[in-house]
Image (cartoon, rainbow, N blue to C red):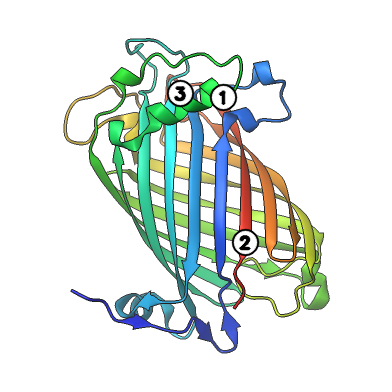
């Protein structure tokens, strides 16, 4: 059945930014540590490509947008998870090898102070995720990395789905002072065979010539620089990558019900190109896991203009 598409994404003079985004996360990007001290386990790699569109399905516009600026975003990505101690056969208490290849589509409604997003994620685990090949290639390119041993024991191939909703608020000083800093608290909820959880958190930025984080800023300067800190606490009901396959028995561990995450980083923008680095540290994710795990992320954003 064909879906009617509603355009444009403007409302009351406001317009959502349209960008193309590429990001790579890896625990090898813990640049504050010597290379031989960086971990290569748990959440070890993630790669994402995303882009925005003006067109929004009419039913989604009616359900979440109202009179707000409305748009949609699409993303494809891959994630890789490995146990702390590598072995040919699973070690009791160690999380399973797991790969995840997915696509996500979301509808977005926003004003200058709020941003709401509702999305659907579809993907596949197991060999079709190509996680084993990705890690083996990466290890081959980086001198000194071991050959992964346990991918023959990874979670089996199965489709997975998640439906998510999030809300972000933006608070900044009035007038031009708001270009020096802002605070954006948020919540996120997700349910499905992939993950079931609820999280609350936020991000605080400070810098020079800050632009609006999600709307087109007609007063934007040709450059921007900032630092940020953020975090969240998440209540987890299910995590496929820890609890194992949904439809049959597999390697699994007991996830912890509450997980906290801290991020900090720096970003710059010249004209339409923005680059951001963030360092992330998460708490214990499963009862027999390490007390914390860190990784770094490098992201690039290209603004497509109006």
Snapshot quadrant of residue 174: bottom right
| Disc 1 versus disc 2: nearer the observer | 1
Q: Residue at the spot x=36%, y=42% of the render? A: 101
Q: Which of marks 3 and 2 is nearer the N terminus?
A: 3
Neighbourhood count class around disc 2 (C-alpha, 10 Å): few under 14, some 14–19, many 20 upward = some
Q: Identify the disc placed on residue 302.
A: 2
x and y percentages locating residue 58 in the rendered image:
32, 80
Q: Which of 281 and 159 is in front in this view?
A: 159
Question: Residue 123, how many percent across, how many down?
Answer: 31, 46
* Rendered-image quadrant of the N terminus: bottom left
Residue 116 position in % (x across, y down): 47, 68
Q: How far separated are the C-alphas under marks 1 and 2?
A: 28 Å
| Residue 114 visible in the picture | yes
SS at mark 3? helix
Tell which circle, 1 or 2, labels the residue nearer the N-terminal end: 1
Can residue 126 be seen here? The reply is: no
Quadrant holding the C terminus: bottom right
Instruction: Answer with left or right where residue 1 lies relative to residue 74.
Output: left
SS category of the residue bearing label 1: helix
Q: Distance between the residues labelled 3 and 2?
A: 30 Å
Secondary structure under badge 2? strand
Residue 56: percent from left, percent from top: 39, 76
Q: Which of marks 1 and 3 is nearer the N terminus?
A: 3
- Residue 23: give its label: none
Query: Which residue is identified by label 3?
Result: 136
Residue at the spot 68% in from the left edge and 76% down from the top edge: 217
Front-most of residues 56 and 263: 56
227 up-or-down from 99: above or below: below
**Residue 141: image tag:** 1
In the image: residue 75, left or right of residue 217: left
Q: In this view, does 253 lie above or below 182?
A: above
């Amino acid at each position: 059945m064909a879906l009617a598409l509603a355009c444009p994404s403007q409302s009351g003079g406001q317009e959502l930014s349209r960008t193309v985004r590429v990001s790579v996360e890896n625990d090898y990007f813990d640049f504050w540590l010597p290379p031989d001290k960086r971990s290569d386990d748990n959440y070890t790699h993630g790669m994402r490509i995303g882009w925005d569109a003006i067109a929004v399905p009419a039913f989604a516009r009616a359900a979440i947008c109202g009179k707000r600026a409305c748009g949609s975003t699409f993303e494809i990505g891959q994630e890789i998870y490995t146990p702390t101690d590598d072995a040919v056969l699973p070690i009791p208490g160690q999380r399973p090898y797991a790969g995840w290849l997915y696509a996500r589509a979301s509808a977005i409604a926003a004003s200058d102070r709020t941003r709401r997003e509702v999305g659907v994620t579809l993907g596949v685990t197991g060999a079709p995720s190509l996680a084993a090949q990705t890690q083996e290639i990466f290890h081959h390119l980086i001198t000194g990395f071991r050959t992964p041993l346990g991918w023959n024991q990874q979670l089996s191939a199965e489709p997975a789905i998640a439906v998510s909703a999030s809300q972000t608020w933006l608070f900044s000083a009035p007038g031009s002072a708001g270009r020096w800093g802002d605070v954006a608290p948020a919540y996120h909820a997700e349910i499905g065979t992939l993950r079931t959880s609820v999280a609350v958190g936020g991000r605080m930025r400070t810098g020079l010539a800050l632009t609006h984080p999600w709307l087109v800023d007609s007063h934007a300067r040709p450059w921007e620089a900032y630092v940020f800190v953020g975090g969240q606490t998440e209540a987890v009901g299910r995590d496929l990558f820890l609890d194992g396959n949904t439809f049959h028995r597999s390697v699994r561990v007991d996830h912890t019900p509450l997980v906290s995450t801290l991020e900090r980083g720096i970003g710059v923008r010249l004209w339409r190109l923005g680059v951001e680095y963030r360092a992330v540290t998460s708490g214990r994710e499963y009862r027999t896991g390490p007390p914390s795990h860190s990784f770094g992320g490098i992201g690039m954003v290209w603004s497509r203009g109006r």
